[in-house]
């Protein structure tokens, strides 16, 4: 991005809002798939590979970090008023 292309505060918040909208759709779809997989696992009394568990733990860590960042954004926006 050139110096003239630096996003304004409003543009940055708009990009964040758009990203959150897309992510929330993706998260809802993923949750439905996970719930279906959990039901399937329980009905078959089976398990998943260790790599799936590791990836799930990594996803949880990323979601927690994202939650903290979003809380910081909202706090800073509230503090400016």
Image (cartoon, rainbow, N blue to C red):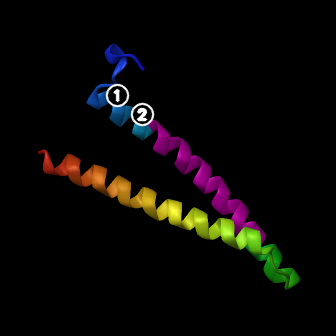
Which residue is located at x 35 percent, y 33 percent?
A: 12
| Residue placed furthest toward the left | 81
Q: Which residue is tagged 1?
A: 11
Cα distance between the residues tagged 1 and 2: 6 Å
Quadrant hosting residue 65: bottom left
Which residue is located at x 21 percent, y 50 percent?
A: 76
Q: Is residue 52 left or right of residue 22?
A: right
The picture places residue 64, in percent across and down from the top left corner, at 46, 64
Q: Is residue 6 left or right of residue 25?
A: left
Quadrant of the image for the N terminus? Answer: top left
Q: Is residue 57 left or right of residue 39?
A: left
Quadrant hosting residue 8: top left
Q: Look at the numbered disc 1 and give the secondary structure of its residue.
A: helix
Segment colored magenta: 18-37
Q: Which residue is tagged 2?
A: 15
Which residue is located at x 38 percent, y 16 percent?
A: 2
The picture places residue 40, in percent across and down from the top left corner, at 82, 74
Number of numbered discs on residues = 2
Which residue is located at x 47 percent, y 45 percent?
A: 20
| Residue placed furthest toward the bottom | 45
Q: Is residue 34 left or right of residue 68?
A: right
Whether residues under marks 1 and 2 lie with C-beta atoms below 8 angstroms apart, the answer is yes
Q: Is residue 15 magenta?
A: no
Reply above or below: 31 against 74: below
Query: 76 or 32, which lies in front?
Result: 76
Quadrant of the image for the C terminus? Answer: top left
Q: Main secondary structure of the magenta part?
A: helix
């Amino acid at each position: 991005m050139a110096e003239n292309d630096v996003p304004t505060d409003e543009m940055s918040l708009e990009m964040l809002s758009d990203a959150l909208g897309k992510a929330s759709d993706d998260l809802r779809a993923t949750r439905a798939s996970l719930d279906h997989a959990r039901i399937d696992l329980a009905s078959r009394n089976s398990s998943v590979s260790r790599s799936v568990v590791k990836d799930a733990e990594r996803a949880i860590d990323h979601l927690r970090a994202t939650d903290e960042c979003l809380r910081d954004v909202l706090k800073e926006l509230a503090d400016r008023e």
